[in-house]
Amino acid sequence: MTAVINPATEAVVAQVAATSLEDTDAAIERAHVALASWRAVAPGDRARLLRRFADAVDADVENLAQLEVSNSGHTIGNARWEARNVRDVLHYYAATPERLLGKQIPVPGGVNMTFNEPLGVVGIIVPWNFPMPIAGWGFAPALAAGNTVVLKPAELTPLTAIRLGELAAEAGIPPGVFTVLPGKGSVVGQRFVTHPAVRKVVFTGSTEVGKQIMAGCADQVKRVTLELGGKNANIVFADSDLEKAAATAPYGVFDNAGQDCCARSRILVQRSVFDRFMELLEPAVAGVVVGDPAAEATEMGPLISAEHHDRVAGYLDDGTNVAFRGSAPDGPGFWFPPTVVLPSGPTDRIVTDEVFGPVVTVLPFEDEADAISLANDTEYGLSGSIWTNDVGRALRVSRAVEAGNLSVNSHSSVRYWTPFGGFKQSGLGRELGPDAALAFTEVKNVFIAT
Ligand code: TAP
């Protein structure tokens, strides 16, 4: 049994049994056996089952949200958004079974057709920072495309995934089609990589483990989607609405206590407005409401664990030039205040590493070329923001920044209608959007001589 801890109180909220290797194998076998019957479900009926699953999630939003507050320390507002996101993603991909259109391609001597065939069993490995949405972004399109799914939540945050598994069963998703397997990455997750019946691994987590997964999958030429780390730039030009850029910057990085692969953890500010920006940023950071995640007004909760707290704290020492900090409650709980750092330069560890906590660095830049160069000076490439009132500049910089998800005059990263994923070491493949279900299919080409 693994104790599940509330990171805001350090109280044990549940005990969850870790799935053994034998039970993982048995679940993969059941998923493999269930493939034929799931595939045989008529497209319209598969769509209806996914909509019923979405409705079951909808009816359970408050319960799921409260579970996430107590397991992950997410603010109640965020947790409700996350549960509704699973519902919306299920509804969105419920349209897929009836629209998985192949092609008829003109060729001489016959008729040529393509089919989008399901891959088989898909293994989904989820991190602790967004347990619900990241699970849904994998299982909804995978199921819609006719695959069966085994899903491993993070050991720290299994509760909402377990509940989603129950809701799927209540909605009528057949046994073996969607199975949640709480347990260790080194046991359950690793078995997804090595078991020959698992045809694709969807992994979201650290770049370090993602590389191991990719290397492991190479052995069987297994398909992979990887959503990995980020060190995203928030570029503020002098010609922007500086008040708005400063007022929103804390929410671009401190949301979910900075435990967000899309956190804009490097603010780059044009030198001519640097001092003014910092004057505006200070009260904005002080205004972030940090505390009890169950309280409606709270904007930032705790870090996920004591170990992670120590890791984040390890980025700050006596020599760190902290410009200012927000507030945080005293223990119990793994609290860390919003922290703004003025580094000595772009090569400081705190600028280059993904801290994954409520810590942001602010650096000046001279001109557009300098901003682009600094933004791209990282092995990551997930997201970023560009603040400017010049449309031409917004487009030029958006095209030049090497990242998968950019927003202009906003910090929005995730819209389920649009593709999401990383450049460089931030990942491989795209989730969400109109094409994500295709990543769970193989294209088969059939020629009939006439
Ligand atoms: P990891 O330590 O990489 O863990 C992620 C998941 O992988 C967990 O379920 C973990 O299981 C499992 N795992 C660990 N070792 C494994 C192995 N050898 N084989 C198979 N599975 C294994 O990441 P984390 O610390 O939980 O999450 C934070 C990271 O995720 C950050 O770098 C963040 O940027 C990234 N992230 C990226 C995105 C996107 S969309 N790009 C979104 C969210 C998070 P255990 O629970 O047993 O450790």
Image: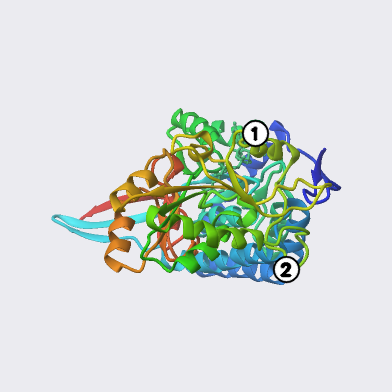
Name the residue rendered at 77%, 65% in the picture: 63
Residue 415 position in % (x across, y down): 49, 64
Please state the quadrant of the image where ligand 1 appears: top right
Image quadrant occupied by the C terminus: bottom left
**Mark 1 burial class by Cα count in 10 Å: few <14, some 14-19, many 20+:** few
| Secondary element type, mark 1 | loop
Q: Nearer the viewer, mark 1 or mark 2?
A: 1
Q: Is residue 154 left or right of residue 405?
A: right
| Secondary element type, mark 2 | loop
Name the residue rendered at 64%, 39% in the picture: 312
Q: Is residue 70 left or right of residue 405?
A: right
Kindly identify which numbered label has been placed on residue 403: none
Image quadrant occupied by the N terminus: top right
Label 1 vs 2, first from the N-terminus? 2
Q: Which residue is mark 1?
A: 318
Question: Disc 1 residue type?
Answer: Asp
Q: Quadrant of residue 388?
A: bottom left
Q: Indicate whether 235 appears above or below 409.
A: above
Residue 162 is at least partly visible in this image: yes
Camera-side residue: 241 or 79?
A: 241
Residue 133 position in % (x across, y down): 60, 57
Residue 329 position in % (x across, y down): 78, 53
**Mark 2 burial class by Cα count in 10 Å: few <14, some 14-19, many 20+:** some
> How far is mark 1 from mark 2, CA to CA?
33 Å
Question: Disc 2 residue type?
Answer: Ala
Q: Give the number of callouts.
A: 2
Asked whether mark 2 lies closer than 8 Å to ligand 1, one says no
Q: Which residue is mark 2?
A: 297
Name the residue rendered at 58%, 37% in the picture: 192
